[in-house]
Amino acid sequence: MAQPDRSGAVSYNPVSQEGWITTRLDFLVNWGRANSLWPMPFGTACCAIEFMASAASHFDLARFGMERMAFSPRQSDVLICAGRVPFKLAPVLRRIYQQMHQPKWVISMGACASSGGMFDSYAVVQGIDTIIPVDVYVPGCPPRPEGLIHGIMMLQQKIMEERMSDEALRDEMVPDPTSQLYIPPSRIDELSEPFGNSVHQTRSAP
Amino acid sequence: MSHASSKDPGAPAFAIVHTGQPGAPAPKSPRNLPHRGGEVNPSVEALRARFGAAIARHEVVWGDTTVYVARERVAEIAQWLHDDPTQRYDYLVDVTAVEYRDGVRPMEVVWHLRSLAYRRFLRLKVELPADGVTPLEVPSVWGIWKGADWLERECFDMFGIRFAGHPDLRRILLWEDYKEGHPLRKDFPLRGRFSRAEQLSNALAADPEARYSMEELSVADAFASLPEDMRKRLGGGERVGE
């Protein structure tokens, strides 16, 4: 299949009609999706303050088609998880993700959402990718609005490369009914291995 | 802390000392306080006179007085401190607990009391020795200060200390079927007792909507597990199920 024309200029070349329609429809649909991402803000901590700054007039997310914050998951396209997620909130976050309509994407904003950050404790989820699939991770503690906007532009780039023929993209991930996880437990334990000095904090404490 | 008004025990019970009033002594600045020792809160003497052996010892740390009292009589003592016109501890600031690392010093339950009328601060402590006999239980002061409700629930959630007589003693910060114990105890590992996958799996198995319906603050399936008075209150007009 031919690569889509990302220049944005729509040209009509009757000679190369083969495979042309599918590609252009991809481009059109993706272009529409990428430039009208409505965010569902899931702000739990200081990252949400930076998110608000990104949305406000100085940085102005509306330039990227995020004119409207969708505070209902039913009307949103991209879940922006800004801040740490305690275990108590994990089922809520997953429920909100499940309530969103396809197509949907997730941005994990900041160190805590991406990896638990400094909160390597009994109460905090070590990365929201153990609960829901994540498309873009934005590093930072918290990331500056430029960082978030860069992450959003990366997501737009990712959306532009999607194919309608790839049905797997729109598959809902169904968690294992017994464990409620969709990643194997061993993988989750590996993902949430501690870094640095904190290895000394073992579970075998008396 | 100022004990300015406490010098005169014959003063009327309702006398409130305002620094702005002419002639009233200004409260002492908290600066230049000794670490240990200093002016003892006069309530200690009154407590000793009234409760005798139930008052074990007292100490003054950074100007604040701490009294160690007997576990069995703490409710009685708190009631007296609240009601007596010469004490009037009408504000419960905090209920919390302390566990020490050495495993020898007993666990302590702490009540921070303030008498707004007399400008006094008093810290009550009860020691719960880890002798395997003393239960982790103290009387609730909910009947005296209603504000103790959530403070005692938090203390129960974090330390596992039971407050006898509390109307609704259940977890407040962690979710109700949390299985790993009480996180502020010294034997609790920082990361919890279960592996991350187990923790996640337990957390995700919880159904937030089983307890609260989508309608704000109306109680769904968990209605039967609510305490009696809540059932009575919600059972009437409010929607109680999906």
Image: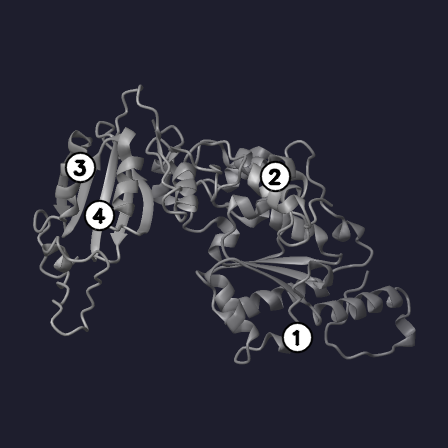
Tell me if mark 1 has few (under 14), some (14-19) or many (20+) residues whose alpha carbon lies within 10 angstroms of its own. Answer: some
- Output the chain of dot 4: B
User: Mark 3 near mark 4, Cβ–Cβ under 8 Å?
Assistant: no
Eye-nearest disc, 2 or 4: 4
Q: Residue furthest top?
A: B133
Q: Which mark is residue A201?
A: none
Residue annotated with mark 3: B50
Mark 3: which amino acid? Arg
- Output the chain of dot 1: A
SS class, disc 2: loop
Residue annotated with mark 2: B206
Q: Which mark is residue A67?
A: 1
- Output the chain of dot 3: B
- Output the chain of dot 2: B
SS class, disc 4: strand
User: Mark 1 near mark 2, Cβ–Cβ under 8 Å?
Assistant: no
Eye-nearest disc, 3 or 1: 3
SS class, disc 3: helix
Visible in this render: residue B183? no
Q: Residue at point 20% right, 50% down?
A: B86
Mark 2: which amino acid? Ala
User: x, y (%) of residue B108?
Assistant: 27, 35
